[in-house]
């Protein structure tokens, strides 16, 4: 029997997957295309390279804020409608990046482009809702999530390579128009999707959104200041403490709200919080460790005493190699899940990427071994990127699927934001973060923290596996509030 709020879809599932994959191609373009031209953007806008950090910081904070409310809106008004609106916003922002006349305009456009982070969780929610009532719903959702993630990662590779080839052949404006065209084409394509109606009777929780926004803005804003001004910055730490303090009234407010933005009762259940905690821990390495890895590969051993001294082109090849194994890891999620089970497959992915980061400690001086280490990290992480939103959807009531999958992206982003600040402190050789190289001991700390995050995530998933099975078997047929109510 189909859950309330669902009806048999008219469009074949393969057609839906193809349309959603087109959106992930656009996501890959956004994530892979701009890297090779960031220096040119700084020159064009006549700003210092350091100012480019504000683009990353602003988009990071905005991404963490925008996912939960948009995901919840998808549950209420329909996921396709929200996906179309979000894609339209990203298209406008990407055109703004192409023609930004000044750095403030670029900053606004770059920030709004961060709306793209909601695409993958909304897409997973669409597939999960469309397959409601099927005995293989969980397996199909995981398989489609793996396909979408693999499409994303392969698109990142192609976009990065294409940008590198075009950088010296066309003008900067022409280069920046291309991703805008790609994103814009997705809007009419998504209009072809059939809407799966939202759950009737719900209402949006503005109070919960306000409190959550205050907490996230304060914590991530404080962490950004720590990265910019150093660990001794008193205003930065005051912001972090204030943001953490706001979480207490936010939790109480959401717990008492009849239709909360984040169902904290559901979140408190081991089946759900274990997945969200895993997203947070994976985000630490997936999003937080990429800059340290890049700087290590680019560092000249003759100058710093470590690193491999890769050129920019060689560094791009390293990124492409790593992303390729992310895609392979995503595509192996289905077979591994069938062999081990969904939860054990996630545990395995966590252990694999933990082993990869731990291997950096003895193998950091070997260029050949470093490529193998990156392959191991990519395999473990790639499967998790696909598995986490699917796992969150599997243990959420029908009326909370979008919220649960969206929260995984928010958790991952916050984990990456916290880790990036911690790693910046680890790599600082003085009290200020404005240093070029960092120390080898700092890199040891980064690799150790990433390895520990994988082991902790594996432990959390393993210890909560039995409770997750209970929730899956007892999930209500209708849009119940949560398993604990």
Image (tube, rainbow, N blue to C red):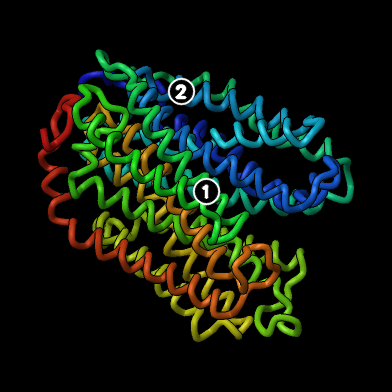
Q: Position of residue 324 (x, y in %)?
A: 57, 60
Q: Which mark is residue 82?
A: 2
Element under disc 1: helix
Q: Say which of 48 and 261 sits in front.
A: 48
Residue at the image position 24 percent from the left and 57 percent from the top: 341
Q: Say which of 76 and 24 sits in front.
A: 76
Please tell me which of labels 1 and 2 falls first in the chain: 2
Residue, disc 1? 235
Residue at the image position 81 percent from the left and 45 percent from the top: 47
Q: Which mark is residue 204?
A: none
Q: Farthest residue toward the top? A: 201
| Residue 214 sits above or below residue 281 on the image | above
Quadrant of the frame with the C terminus = top left
Residue at the image position 61 percent from the left and 77 percent from the top: 439
- Looking at the image, residue 360 sits to the left or right of residue 262; the answer is right
Circle 1 or circle 2, nearest the eye: 1
Q: Position of residue 169 (x, y in %)?
A: 89, 47
Element under disc 2: helix
């Amino acid at each position: 029997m189909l859950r309330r709020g669902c009806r048999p879809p008219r469009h074949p599932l393969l057609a839906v997957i193809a349309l959603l994959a087109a959106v992930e191609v656009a996501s890959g373009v956004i994530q892979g295309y701009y890297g090779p031209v960031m220096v040119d953007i700084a020159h064009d806008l006549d700003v210092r390279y350091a100012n480019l950090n504000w683009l990353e910081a602003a988009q990071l904070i905005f991404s963490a804020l925008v996912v939960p409310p948009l995901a919840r809106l998808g549950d209420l008004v329909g996921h396709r409608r929200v996906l179309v609106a979000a894609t339209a916003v990203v298209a406008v922002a990407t055109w703004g990046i192409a023609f930004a006349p000044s750095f403030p305009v670029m900053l606004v456009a770059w920030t709004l482009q961060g709306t793209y982070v909601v695409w993958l969780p909304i897409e997973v929610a669409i597939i999960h809702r469309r397959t409601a009532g099927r005995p293989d719903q969980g397996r199909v959702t995981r398989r489609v999530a793996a396909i979408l993630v693999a499409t994303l990662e392969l698109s990142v590779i192609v976009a990065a390579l294409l940008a590198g080839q075009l950088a010296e052949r066309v003008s900067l404006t022409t280069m920046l128009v291309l991703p805008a065209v790609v994103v814009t084409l997705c809007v009419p394509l998504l209009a072809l999707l059939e809407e799966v109606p939202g759950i009737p009777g719900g209402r949006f929780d503005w109070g919960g959104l306000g409190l959550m926004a205050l907490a996230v803005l304060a914590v991530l804003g404080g962490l950004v200041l720590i990265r910019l001004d150093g660990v001794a910055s008193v205003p930065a730490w005051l912001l972090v403490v204030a943001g953490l303090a706001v979480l207490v009234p936010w939790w109480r407010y959401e717990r008492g709200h009849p239709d909360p933005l984040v169902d904290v009762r559901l979140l408190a259940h081991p089946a759900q919080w274990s997945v969200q905690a895993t997203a947070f821990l994976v985000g630490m390495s997936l999003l937080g460790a990429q800059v340290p890895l890049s700087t290590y590969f680019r560092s000249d051993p003759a100058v710093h005493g470590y690193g491999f001294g890769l050129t920019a082109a060689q560094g791009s090849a390293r990124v492409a190699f790593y992303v390729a194994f992310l895609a392979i890891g995503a595509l192996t999620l289905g077979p591994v899940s069938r062999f081990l089970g969904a939860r054990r497959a996630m545990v395995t992915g966590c252990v694999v990427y933990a082993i990869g980061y731990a291997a950096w400690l003895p193998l950091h001086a070997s260029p050949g071994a470093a490529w193998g280490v990156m392959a191991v990290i990519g395999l473990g992480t790639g499967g998790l990127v696909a598995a986490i939103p699917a796992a969150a959807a599997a243990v959420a009531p029908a009326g909370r699927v979008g919220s649960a999958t969206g929260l995984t992206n928010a958790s991952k982003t916050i984990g990456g934001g916290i880790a990036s600040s911690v790693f910046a402190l680890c790599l600082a050789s003085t009290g200020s973060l404005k240093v070029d190289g960092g120390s080898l001991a700092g890199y040891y700390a980064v690799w150790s923290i990433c390895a520990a995050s994988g082991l902790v995530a594996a432990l959390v998933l393993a210890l909560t596996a039995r409770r997750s099975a209970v929730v899956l078997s007892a999930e209500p047929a209708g849009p119940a509030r949560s398993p604990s109510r």
